[in-house]
Image (cartoon, rainbow, N blue to C red):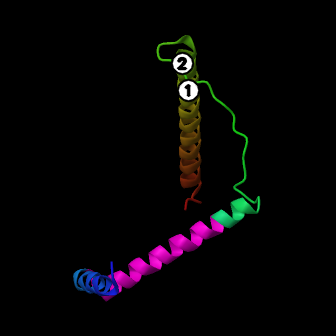
Amino acid sequence: MGPTELLIILGIALLLFGGSRLAGLGKGVGRSIKEFKQEVRSVDDGKGPEVVDAEIVQPETRGGSHLETEQERRAREIEARERDLQAREAAAREESLRQRDTGTGI
């Protein structure tokens, strides 16, 4: 492909996309190349990405007793939270009524 064909292709691209879109496209390609070069250098220098240990978790099986006990535990936690919330609401109502009765309500 000669220089004449390249100029024709660039002219058509300029007409199709416009100058600002081509500039943005060139900027994005430049950033990508720069980032790629940095990653290649870091791998060559031995400064690769940090490896983190991860814990392997056994998947829960459907219909298994472990899954049912986990669901039961979650249900108990939700019930306990609801009871706690109801107790707090009742205490707040009582405090509000007490303040209203004494005339120091907000």
Of 96 and 45, the residue lying toward us = 45
Q: Nearer the viewer, mark 1 or mark 2?
A: 2
Q: Residue 71 in the image: x percent, y percent?
A: 53, 22
Of 50 and 73, the residue lying toward us = 50
Kindly identify the amino acid type of the residue bearing the numbered disc 2: Leu
Is 24 magenta? The answer is: yes
User: SS class of the residue under badge 1?
Assistant: helix
**Location of the C terminus (image quadrant):** bottom right
Residue at coordinates 58% horizontally, 28% vertically from top-left?
77
Residue at coordinates 69% horizontally, 34% vertically from top-left?
55
Tell which circle, 1 or 2, labels the residue nearer the N-terminal end: 2
Kindly identify the amino acid type of the residue bearing the numbered disc 1: Arg
Image check: 97 left or right of 9?
right
Q: Is residue 56 above or below residue 92?
A: above
Image check: 49 left or right of 72?
right
The kind of secondary structure the magenta stretch mainly shows is helix
Residue marked by disc 1:
74
Q: CA distance from mark 1 to mark 2?
A: 11 Å
Residue marked by disc 2:
67
Q: Are marks 1 and 2 in contact (CB under 8 Å)?
A: no
What segment is highlighted magenta in the picture? 17-39
Residue at coordinates 72% horizontally, 48% vertically from top-left?
51
